Image (cartoon, grey):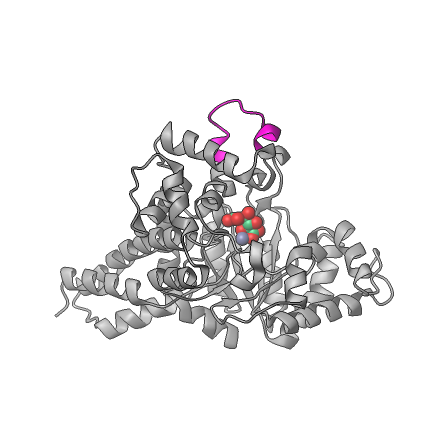
């Protein structure tokens, strides 16, 4: 029997039991050593919180960054959690994590939390977080030009099927002045003007690393003024290297568009902002390269309607996630509702973008609550007209949204 209450129970149950694939994170598996971030000090020094804490008084930015990690965490803790109420989305997330881990959220002494995290045995702790969150698999962000990361891929990498790779190519597309010398040092014959063997050598680099990492896709973040018609070297590399390689390997290219890097460089990682982009570049790519697949997320709220309609026009375009500054309940709700209304179930509603392991708990908990709210509304619109829904159909739909849409898109 379909009634409102039943549907609500079925949706909540389906959302809490679906096995999630988190398609974009900055997490690393245990074998990456220090790149695996966890615990209260890492949570408090997350760049989302740093930007917020530094708004409250006139502390010198440089002075703050000169502090040790523990001292920075203490500063953020005092400002955002002791002297103020942690109401913002990033601050509330810390409270959600502590609560879900069974800790007393009213303790003001940071050492109480530190002791808990210090006492964890990493491997079983990792298992526990995967269990709490029902995450089957998450995708890392992997940059072979990063010295620390590269070292692990070359020596000491241990496969863990819960952590899959994505080859991040911001270096070759956005900062050739630093990435090309690195490529040359690694033995790739590339010229700054892209002459000679450069195109073939970049392709060789991409293929070698896709294979080494078993990467599920290539990814790049792009500025708001990203264009495919500006005659830039970036466009040349995309069209002559990245797209042919992705097509040959049958993997998507993930485009993350709209980030304005280092608006306030003094804030370091916390200093990036956003602006509207022109969807034309996406239309051009999807239309001109129907054999390529594009996983896309866009940072500006103002772009979301055009973006959703563009996805209706191109089946090689898969919208994913509410990225970064869109990852808050009111914005997720608005965007998810719009996507459901115009794309049905054919999109990927969320990814976490976690940098610290326990953030998987809060980011998914908060997003799932919003997804449930919107789906309850949408399913109720149908049952009010006598449309019959079964638990099986609801489970299927939600499993598609939280995991299977991605794997189907990858394997098409
Ligand atoms: O470029 C990206 O992948 C961004 O998501 C990050 O660089 C950003 O700093 C972030 O953590 C957003 O959530
Ligand atoms: Zn990211």
Q: Is residue 261 above or below residue 171?
A: above
Q: Point out the residue furthest to the right here.
A: 196
Q: Residue 196: name its quadrant.
A: bottom right
Q: Residue 88: name its quadrant.
A: top left
Nearer to us in this view, 176 or 394: 176
Q: Is residue 17 magenta?
A: no
Residue 257 appears in the picture as rendered = no
**How far across and down, in percent of the image, does residue 113 sit?**
38, 43
**How far across and down, in percent of the image, does residue 229 sit?**
70, 55
Q: Residue at x 50, y 57 (%)?
A: 25
252 displayed left or right of 399: right
**How far across and down, in percent of the image, does residue 169 sit?**
66, 59
Q: Residue at x 75, y 54 (%)?
A: 179
Stretch in magenta: 51-64
The N terminus lies in quadrant:
bottom left
Nearer to us in this view, 382 or 347: 347
Q: Residue at x 51, y 55 (%)?
A: 297
367 displayed left or right of 227: left
Residue 195 appears in the picture as rendered = yes
Nearer to us in this view, 141 or 31: 31
Q: How many marks?
A: 0
**How far across and down, in percent of the image, does residue 144 sit?**
67, 61
Q: Is residue 330 above or below residue 120?
A: above
Q: Is residue 57 magenta?
A: yes
Q: Is residue 66 above or below residue 188?
A: above
């Amino acid at each position: 029997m379909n009634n409102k209450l039943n549907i609500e129970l079925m949706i909540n149950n389906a959302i809490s039991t679906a096995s999630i694939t988190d398609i974009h994170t900055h997490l690393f598996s245990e074998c990456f050593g220090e790149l695996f971030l966890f615990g209260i000090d890492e949570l408090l020094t997350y760049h989302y919180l740093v930007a917020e804490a530094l708004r409250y008084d006139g502390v010198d930015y440089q002075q703050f960054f000169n502090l040790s990690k523990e001292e920075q965490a203490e500063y953020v803790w005092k400002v955002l959690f002791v002297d103020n109420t942690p109401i913002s989305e990033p601050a509330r997330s810390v409270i959600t994590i502590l609560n879900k881990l069974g800790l007393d959220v009213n303790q003001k002494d940071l050492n109480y939390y530190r002791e808990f995290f210090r006492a964890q045995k990493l491997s079983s702790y990792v298992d526990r977080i995967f269990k709490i969150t029902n995450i089957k698999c998450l995708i890392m962000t992997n940059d072979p030009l990063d010295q620390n990361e590269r070292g692990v891929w070359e020596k000491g990498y241990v496969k863990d099927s819960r952590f899959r790779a994505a080859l991040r190519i911001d270096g070759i597309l956005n900062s050739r002045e630093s990435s090309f010398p690195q490529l040359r040092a690694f033995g790739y014959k590339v010229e700054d003007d892209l002459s000679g063997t450069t195109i073939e050598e970049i392709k060789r680099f991409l293929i070698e690393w896709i294979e080494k990492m078993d990467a599920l896709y290539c990814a790049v973040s792009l500025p708001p003024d990203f264009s495919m018609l500006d005659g830039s070297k970036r466009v040349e590399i995309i069209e002559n290297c990245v797209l042919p390689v992705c097509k040959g390997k049958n993997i998507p290219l993930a485009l993350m568009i709209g980030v304005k890097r280092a608006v306030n460089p003094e804030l370091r990682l916390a200093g990036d902002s956003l602006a509207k982009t022109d969807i034309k570049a996406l239309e051009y790519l999807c239309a001109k390269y129907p054999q390529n697949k594009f996983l896309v997320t866009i940072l500006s709220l103002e772009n979301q309607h055009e973006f959703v309609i563009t996805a209706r026009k191109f089946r090689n375009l898969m919208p994913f996630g509410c990225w970064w500054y869109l990852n808050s309940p009111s914005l997720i709700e608005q965007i998810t509702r719009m996507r459901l209304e115009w794309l049905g179930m054919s999109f990927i509603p969320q990814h976490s973008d976690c940098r610290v392991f326990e953030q998987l708990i809060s980011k998914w908990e908060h997003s799932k609550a919003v997804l449930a709210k919107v789906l309850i509304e949408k399913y109720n619109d149908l049952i009010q007209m006598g449309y019959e829904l079964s638990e099986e159909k609801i489970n299927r739909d939600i499993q598609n949204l939280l995991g299977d849409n991605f794997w189907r898109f990858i394997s098409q």
